[in-house]
Amino acid sequence: MSDHDPQLDSATTDIRTRIDTSTPHSARFWNYFVGGKDNYEKDRELGDHIKQIFPGLVDVARTSRLFLGRAVRHLAAEQGVRQFLDIGTGLPTADNTHEVAQRAAADSRIVYVDNDPLVLAHARALLTSTPEGHTAYIDADLYKPEAILAEAGRTLDLSQPVALIILNTLGHVADHAQARDLVARLMSGLASGSYLVISDSTTTSEGMIAASNEYNKSGAIPYYVRSVAEIAAFFDGLELLEPGVSQVTRWRPEDAGETTEVDAYGAVGRKP
């Protein structure tokens, strides 16, 4: 188990008083779509409204989570990765990064990063570990990659390969060039042999575009879907693992029946 952190106790008490349930919230909205219970009426109302516009977003949420599991399992079991930096953690659900990684390799070390007060309030659920491994949680901002790396280096050995995971998070960065710069700065601080794992919703159907536009009218922090080419650009300079940038359902599926067409693309790339 990770060490007990009294700061989390006081932080959680303070943070819970600041959680706004009067408007929808991206982490709670996504939690509702993957079948979680950490959501409120406004999140469910928006979720039900979006499902009427574009039912396929439920598949995007579900299959993106499955992609995460397959990618982490592959990196831990097949590529020998023992360190994971998961940015934009979201709310804990089944098969979180540390659970998947440590089932494949008990000595895996995982650092979660989020600056969302609701996620921090639930961080205790993420701070479990095998005796051989370790997990940590950082309350940090994606827009400060160097600070993230400095803090992550207290748990991870950044001179050794790390898998950087950023799932369904970069859409909060409106400007694509800025989002690419943030990813590049994070990867520049990681050793050769490190990996980048990204997936996100894409502008590959009118339904997804309409759903995104409607979500952005809701009062929640806006989220911008991108083209497949823009997703691919995050991997410039990296060696893509097969099958490259693909629909998340088609990235090394373990079940031939799990190849639903979805408006979400992802990939895993290795830093030379």
Image: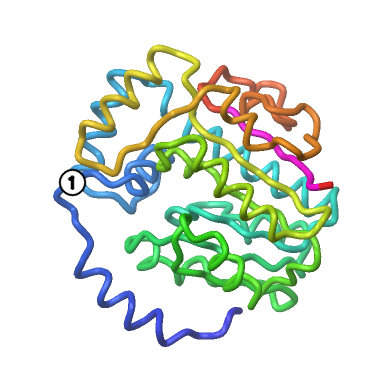
What kind of element bears circle 1? loop
Q: Is residue 88 magenta?
A: no
**Vertical arrangement, residue 97 with respect to residue 66, above or below:** below
The residue that label 1 is drawn on is: 23
**Is residue 270 a member of the stretch shown in magenta?**
yes
User: Which stretch is magenta?
Assistant: 265-271
The image position of residue 228, as x and y in percent, is 58, 23
Q: Is residue 55 left or right of residue 269?
A: left
Residue drawn at 55 percent across, 49 percent down: 182
Instruction: Name the residue: 37% across, 48% down.
Output: 27
Mark 1: few/some/many CA within 10 Å (<14, 14-19, 20+): some
- Under mark 1, the amino acid is Thr
Question: What percent of the width, then of the height, locates residue 9?
Answer: 36, 82
**Residue 16 x/y as whole percent:** 25, 69
Q: Main secondary structure of the magenta part?
A: strand
Q: Is residue 251 above or below residue 31?
A: above
Q: Is residue 212 above or below residue 166?
A: above
As rendered, which of 168 and 270 lies closer to the eye? 270
Is 180 in front, or is 56? 180
Q: Is residue 104 above or below residue 110?
A: above
In the rendered view of the protein, which quadrant contains the N terminus?
bottom right
Residue located 57% across and 45% down the image: 181
